[in-house]
Amino acid sequence: MARHRNVRGYNYDDDFDDDDMYSHSVEDDYGISPATAAQFIYSKRGRHQSFSEPLEEEEDEYDDDDKSRAPSTALSPIDQARLFSCLDQMREVLGESVSEQIMTDAVLQCGFDAAKALDQIFKQESNTKKSGTQEATASERPGKGKARDVPSADTHIVPKIAKLTVSGNKQTMGFAVPSASTEVNGQSSITACTKGQTTDDAMEEADNSALSPASSNTSQVSEDLNSTPSQGKSSGKSKQKINIKEELEKRQGGKQLLNLVVIGHVDAGKSTLMGHLLYLLGHVNKRTMHKYEQESKKAGKASFAYAWVLDETGEERQRGVTMDVGMTKFETKRKVITLMDAPGHRDFIPNMITGAAQADVAILVVDASRGEFEAGFEAGGQTREHALLVRSLGVTQLAVVVNKMDQVNWQEERFREVTSKLGHFLKQAGFKDSDVSYIPTSGLSGENLAKKSEVNELKSWYKGPCLIDQIDLFKAPQRSIDKPFRLCASDVFKDQGSGFCVTGKIEAGYVQTGDRLQVMPPNETCSVKGITLHDEAVDWATAGDHVSLTLTGVDIIKINVGCVFCSLSEPIRACTRFRARVLLFNFDVPVTQGFPVIIHYQTISEPATIRKLISVLHKSTGEVVKKKPKCLTKGMNAIIELQTQRPVALELYKDFKELGRFMLRYSGSSIAAGVVTEIKE
């Protein structure tokens, strides 16, 4: 089971208060011998020579006449520092394809100017390439094909500089390479083939580079240039595009993917209901369940044992309420379900919106007890607000679970009373009667969850499906597999190895390991090092999957929750000003120009201001009823312009429905739902 954790804000120093010595184990109170430690000491001289040559070579490798070329002996400490700085910058561009000695000579000849040194190396490689071409032409014989090119030991392979995307006068990432250094054979070019790169890839990159003006002096490096030759080969294999629809059918085994969110008023029994369902389906073993029962009894919350299956944090168990979106996976006969347990307390509505924005269908849990249903539905509870929110966020199918029916002795009259009130409201909220079903259950006793109930009081009047059968009857939505890749980050945390991880739901397209992605709004690029789906490492993932991506090539500090990862060819747009069509809820305060709101979009909450009130629309036809209104009141449908404090990555609703919806809240209440109609910046 996955749960978002605040790993970035965690204070790791608390874990190592008593372990201040090197070569001392954190978990075990003993040291290691020098012989054992020597096995793990990194030796630069022991590296394989095919990846790089050592910077500081043995003195006897230099001839007597070349003693002055040894940087460690001939240079002052200041010049050595300048040399190493230049070499680091050049290595980011050239990778491991050019020897360190050649780069050192170029830096010394150019007076410690990294840009000039790069220019000189590229010119040398260009001349080498020209001479190699002339020799190959001269070696041709009549009646025979061309002689196969055999690279000599002195030939250095030109590194792939990849797509150098011009970004005006601002360098956003990488090392600025003068445009003059990219001229090959008299033509402007910013790509060169590496060993193992296919001709098609090189031509594609050359075509892309031709769109950039040759006079630009600064460029954005959008390719990871620190990979070794062996890594380059493996990434080349991952670039082979797969038939995503065929692979998806194989992986699912005929079962459809469905993202399900459980919503409802606090204390309606959501976590207990779904925790008991998971236990009945065999996703929680008896030993673990027995442990939860004993621990909950000691804490004085014996009835919360099943809720602890999804409420995993200590604070949630202590307070007895869900605070964050708990996520897990289970299967039915025809579906693979990703379950999200949303919090019901009004203080955690933003977290509930995050879960609802990633859901395809929803289960609304209500309490059948006398007074409890009325408190959640009529007296300002969250039942109404949750139903409105999920409908505004695109959920059209809803299962209403009337929970705790055992406390009213399974009375049909009480069930009809609850469903009648809810049915009238849900119809007003936009749900069709055919898309809403009602199921009487008891989360604590497990009646009517995994199988039809045998209770006589219920069997006498209820003939419908049990909860798991109703989940199986939900229709899976059409996935946007053919659209460009989009993923909104719901959590960012450091990985155990190199790189870091982001989690989120893929809204459109698909991703493979080795792919290059663009991150908006920071406008950075990164590489996908690994993909994890339901705690399993996979090579690809597609729209609808909740995944964890391990990324490299970008600093974790630049990535925040809410950043959208997208394809390089068709990136998402980031803006601070956009127009939208909004529908106001039952909100008593009139909305005027300059009204402050909080935008809840996907996984982010961003302060904003209503900059303009453009027009009021007819609810049914959408025609303009009034232009430039002075204010907006409850129930109105209008076009407004919003201004955010920071850039937000958005899509038009007509292009990407999943990324074109948002909610507006003010002073702890949801006041409107909207869709993006125009992006101004």
Image (cartoon, rainbow, N blue to C red):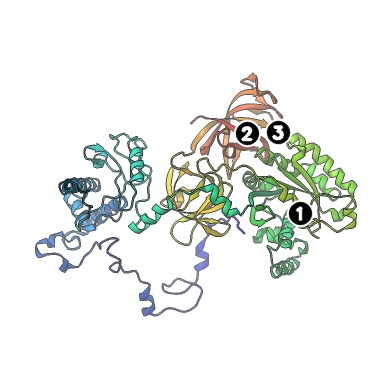
* Amino acid residing under circle 3: Phe
**In whole angstroms, how far apart are the C-alphas of marks 2 and 1?**
31 Å
Determine whether label 1 and label 3 are within 8 Å by CB: no
* Amino acid residing under circle 2: Gly
Q: Which residue is at a point 52% across and 39% down the rendered structure image?
A: 648
Residue 521: tell me if it is visible.
yes
Q: Mark 3: which secondary structure? A: loop
Q: Which residue is at a point 41% across and 74% down the rendered structure image?
A: 23
* Amino acid residing under circle 1: Gly
Observer-nearest of 174 and 645: 174
Residue at mark 1:
269
Q: Which badge, 2 or 1, comes first in the chain's sequence? A: 1
Report the mark closest to the observer, 1 or 3.
1
Residue 393 place in picture, x, y as percent: 65, 40
Instruction: Please indicate whether residue 25 sits to the left or right of residue 388 in the image.
Output: left
Residue at mark 2:
674
Residue 655 place in picture, x, y as percent: 55, 34
Residue 490: tell me if it is visible.
no
Q: Mark 2: which secondary structure? A: strand
For the N terminus, the quadrant is bottom right
